Amino acid sequence: MELKRLEEVKRLVGWRSLVRWFPAPILLIGSWILASHAQSAFDARIYYEGADAWLHGTNPWNVAVSGLHFAAPPWVLPIIAPSTLLNEPRAVGIWIALDAVAAAYIVRRSGLAWGWILFPPLVHGTLNGNPAIASLALLLAGAGPIGVLLRPQVGYALVGERRWRALTVTAVLAIALLAFLPWQTFLADLPTITARYVTESHGGSTGGTPLAFGVGIISVLALATIDLREAGWLATIVAVPINGWYAGAAALPVMNPILAVGLSLPVVGLPTAAIAAYAALRLVIRWAPPGGPARFLAPLVERYRPDDLPDRPAWPFHRPAPVPPGAPAPTEAPSPAEARVSARR
């Protein structure tokens, strides 16, 4: 009996190691593809010129750089505006440097190995100077309101982290800034801005279709019944009508093998499919009987940075049952994902 159990443990350890290391070459391939197609500092230039147009009293959403238009919400403008005190090349260089520092901080703060600095969405956002990377770093550093104003969809992560005070401060700041921002112009032009962005970004990373948006919303809502924190971070990627490839960097604080593969390859719609598959696997593992398929699937959803915090569902549908008094202690510590499987015994 003990020999049989030992063989089972060895088999699971081998499968777990394979699953955890399989994304490594995928990350390198994805980074090479996105880096080879990145236009250095392209996004930083668009944001700079959009803010400059606003300061000069013209419509920032009519600004285009090499055929791509500024499409960010108006709250971004006052944050980018100070950079216009410098000439464009210098300001753009500073934004890339800030994104590089932010990328390193995100990896460090997420508790991951330094190799994750090559995570394709992080590489793509940094090379393009996109403020999405800085906004994630601000969120992780405790400056959530500024991060949300810079990129409103990261507000989902504040909900996931249950940072209600930060959300309140964000709402107050956003309302106060409306008096100084061209929000009426933005709302009037929103259909054009959205349609133009879908066309110019070729669907972005999520596809930009109502179906993809619906799948994203349903996936994160389902995941929220198991872990609101994970749902919040992943909602910043798929619970919006359309997103860029850099958006996948928001998964780093909750990274696991299935997300690592699905967010690394620049295939339109793959991030949405990966997050939907991840949510489905979490539900299967939670509902399935302990052992068997659930134990086999557990390494696919195990975080690279296991923490001691239990799942925190938004709704108490799947709370793990307490361990019965007097239950025998396991002979070896299971992985966090496997622990979730056996928690239902």
Image (cartoon, grey):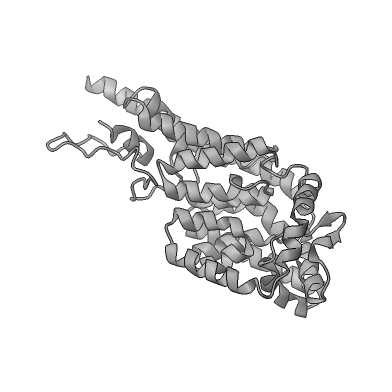
x, y percentage for residue 190? Answer: 74, 55
- Relative to 2, is 101 above or below? below
User: Which quarter shows the C terminus?
Assistant: top left
Q: Quadrant of residue 288?
A: top left
Determine the residue located farthest toward the bottom in the rendered image. 85
**Position of 72 relative to 227 (above/below):** below
Point out residue 211 in the picture as x, y percentages from the top left corner: 65, 35
Residue at screen point 35% across, 35% down: 338
- In the image, 187 versus 270, the foreground residue is 187
Vertical order, 192 against 54 (above or below): above
Left or right for 312, reference 236: left
Seen from the viewer's position, the closer of residues 332 and 84 is 84
Instruction: Identify the residue shown where x is 66% and y is 74%.
Output: 179
Q: Quadrant of the N terminus?
A: top left
Q: Is residue 167 visible?
A: yes
Q: Compared with residue 245, is residue 102 higher up or lower down, i.e. above or below?
A: below
Q: Image point 73% across, 50% down: which residue?
A: 35
Q: Is residue 25 visible?
A: no
List x then y, in percent, for residue 292.
Answer: 36, 22
Q: Position of residue 344 (x, y in %)?
A: 28, 33
Residue occupying image coordinates x 65% and y 63%? 99
- Does residue 339 appear to the left or right of 331 in the view shown? right
The residue closer to the viewer here, 75 or 292, is 75
